[in-house]
Amino acid sequence: MKNLLERIKRLDGAELGRPASAEDLAMATKKLTRNNLPDMPEELKKLLKKSDGLIYDGVEVLPVNPDNMRDADYMPRSIVDVNQKYAFSSFSRKWQGALIFGNADEEIYCFVPTRNKYIIVDRTGYDEYESFDSVTDLLYSVLKISM
């Protein structure tokens, strides 16, 4: 994961968030649980501890604390806010128990605990494009970075 973040830092136009604190992660977990939403997998928490959110070339990994990504031109939504928005949508009916952690123009990135997979889903019909064993593999793929 460290290698991935180092490569992202070198990409022109990439923006990485400040590391999420233990308090940021605990608060997000509490809010997800309170709203009957799935918790973040440990690998995603490790990523957010190093960079709470990232943006590059239309790809976004959502932060747990938007203040860690804020700049003058952009204020991201948090993982909690996005999952609350989709909680009663056709996405949640089709992907019950999935946690959305990122997106791009035509894609949603989510973790499906029942399959222990990170999935790329079409934003309109919610069909599966591709699945990965790790968040790192998914990000290498969508950011088009060679390993």
Image (tube, rainbow, N blue to C red):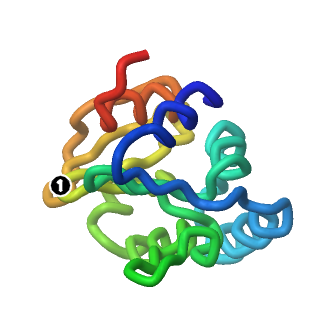
Q: Residue at x 84, y 68 (%)?
A: 23
Q: Which residue is drawn at 38% across and 38% down?
A: 119
Can you say which quadrant of the picture contains the N terminus?
A: top right
- Is 101 placed left or right of 21 in the picture? left
Circle count: 1
Q: Mark 1 points at which residue?
A: 106
Q: Residue at x 51, y 35 (%)?
A: 135
Q: Which amino acid does label 1 sit on?
A: Glu
Vertical relation: 56 (above or below) 36: above
Q: Residue at x 43, y 48 (%)?
A: 110
Query: Tag 1, which secondary structure?
Result: loop
Q: Position of residue 94 (x, y in %)?
A: 31, 54
Q: Where is residue 83 in the image (x, y as percent from the top left)?
A: 48, 69
- Indicate the quadrant where residue 73 lies: bottom left
Compare residues 132 and 34 and report the one nearer the observer.
Answer: 132
- Is 20 placed left or right of 94 in the picture? right
Residue 101 visible from this viewpoint: no
- Indicate the quadrant where residue 30 lies: bottom right
Outermost residue toward the top? 147
Residue 145 visible from this viewpoint: yes
Vertical relation: 22 (above or below) 129: below
Compare residues 28 and 20 and report the one nearer the observer.
Answer: 20
Within-10-Å neighbours for mark 1: few <14, some 14–19, many 20+: few
Q: Position of residue 71 (x, y in %)?
A: 49, 77
Compare residues 7 and 123 and report the one nearer the observer.
Answer: 7
Can you say which quadrant of the picture contains the C terminus?
A: top left
